[in-house]
């Protein structure tokens, strides 16, 4: 019987040490090109319903080969969702809210990147944002960087940021508090994660040697029917001058920019660092600015792995299909 995962179910499935390590390995394999290349995504438009379907490539699932289908409805319809279907007969295995899954889909690569790009033994995290992406990013970084001990949360709404901090402290056991000073939070952190905070974070705010994980900057539009193989880096207009000449900003992307004339020429693909062909910093004082993005094949793997893990742990709500369905 298919299962439906709530936001809490998705968090419970992904926030598991062994499961997260397996997903780090999945991302690393995709970055290094180990194994067969993932197939393309296929876009299906449904004009009559103002919906669109994005059909992902085949991947291994709990009952064999399967594929994920993302349904993005119109603005007046319920939220987007992801369905996992068997490849041989199209049988529904499970469905999940796309927004929650998106948060983890972005956070897992960021956690792997943090292991390679963070300064030694980071203890202070500045977290910008209080939504689902911020929550999943916090849980991933808590696992990826075990030396973290203190978190400051910056959000658009102080009350919501305060509630987020209280829930985060209870979930992680870390010292978590709300901060209304964005500059001070960024300046005192070893790692800063921007997931929708206000104001936007600039690399020049950070201390020497710190890491900025940027999941907040909007990416340029790309055809939804294509499999996006790299990160689209944005030019920052009128960048602030570094506060010290020896604190250069080193830009790292999830994958090599593709077809972008405005991409930073000095941006370094994360795969080069993971493979040992490049170093994240030219000197210890360099600030590293990591820009997340889409990695071909990762969305399908994340959906299949998450639903499969939830199934094995008996997490989720069984969904009855057919005439007797409510």
Image (spheres, grey):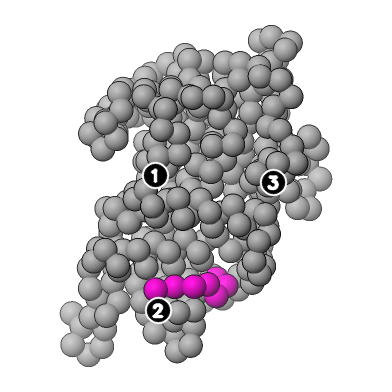
The numbered mark at residue 275 is 3
Q: Is residue 125 above or below residue 87?
A: above
* Residue named by callout 1: 136
**Relative image position of residue 105 (x, y in whole percent):** 48, 53
In space, the residues marked 1 and 3 are separated at their CA atoms by 26 Å
Please tell me which residue is depicted at 45% across the width and 89% down the height of the picture.
89
- Dividing the image into 4 quarters, which one contains the C terminus? bottom left
Q: Earlier in the sequence, mark 2 or mark 3?
A: 2
Please tell me which residue is depicted at 74% across the width and 10% down the height of the picture.
245
Residue 61 colored in magenta in the image? yes
Please tell me which residue is depicted at 48% across the width and 77% down the height of the picture.
66
Mark 2 and mark 3 in contact? Answer it, CB < 8 Å.
no
Q: Residue furthest top?
A: 244
The numbered mark at residue 63 is 2
Q: Nearer the viewer, residue 142 or 287?
A: 142
Please tell me which residue is depicted at 62% across the width and 58% down the height of the picture.
30
272 lies left or right of 190: right
Eye-nearest disc, 1 or 3: 3
In space, the residues marked 2 and 1 are separated at their CA atoms by 27 Å
Q: Nearer the viewer, residue 57 or 76?
A: 57
Q: Secondary structure at mark 2?
A: loop
Q: Is residue 297 above or below residue 3?
A: above
The residues colored magenta run 55-63
314 lies left or right of 17: left
Mark 1 and mark 3 in contact? Answer it, CB < 8 Å.
no
């Amino acid at each position: 019987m298919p299962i439906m995962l709530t936001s809490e179910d998705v968090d419970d499935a992904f926030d598991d040490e062994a499961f997260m390590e397996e997903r780090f390995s999945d991302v690393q394999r995709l970055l290094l090109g180990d194994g067969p290349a993932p197939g393309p995504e296929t876009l299906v438009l449904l004009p009559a319903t103002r919906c669109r379907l994005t059909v992902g490539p085949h991947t291994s699932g709990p009952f064999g080969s399967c594929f994920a289908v993302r349904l993005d409805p119109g603005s007046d319809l319920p939220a987007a969702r992801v369905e996992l279907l068997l490849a041989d007969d199209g049988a529904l295995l499970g469905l999940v809210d796309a927004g929650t899954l998106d948060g983890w889909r972005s956070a897992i690569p960021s956690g792997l990147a943090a292991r390679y790009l963070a300064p030694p033994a980071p203890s202070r995290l500045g977290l910008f944002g209080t939504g689902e992406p911020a929550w999943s990013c916090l849980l991933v970084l808590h696992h990826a960087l075990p030396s973290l001990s203190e978190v400051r949360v910056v959000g658009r709404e102080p009350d919501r940021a305060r509630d987020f901090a209280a829930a985060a402290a209870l979930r992680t056991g870390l010292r978590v508090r709300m901060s209304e000073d964005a500059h001070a939070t960024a300046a005192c952190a070893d790692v800063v994660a921007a997931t929708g905070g206000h104001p936007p974070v600039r690399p020049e705010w950070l201390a020497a040697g710190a890491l900025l994980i940027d999941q907040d900057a909007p990416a340029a539009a790309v055809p939804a029917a294509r499999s996006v193989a790299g990160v689209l880096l944005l030019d920052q207009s009128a960048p602030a001058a570094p506060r010290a000449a020896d604190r250069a900003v080193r830009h790292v992307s999830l994958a090599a920019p593709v077809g972008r004339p405005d991409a930073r020429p000095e941006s370094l693909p994360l795969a080069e660092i993971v493979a040992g062909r490049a170093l994240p910093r030219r000197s210890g004082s360099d600030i590293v600015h990591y820009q997340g993005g889409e990695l071909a094949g990762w969305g399908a793997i994340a959906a299949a792995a998450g639903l499969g893990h939830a199934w094995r742990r008996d997490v989720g709500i069984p969904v009855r299909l057919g005439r007797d369905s409510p």
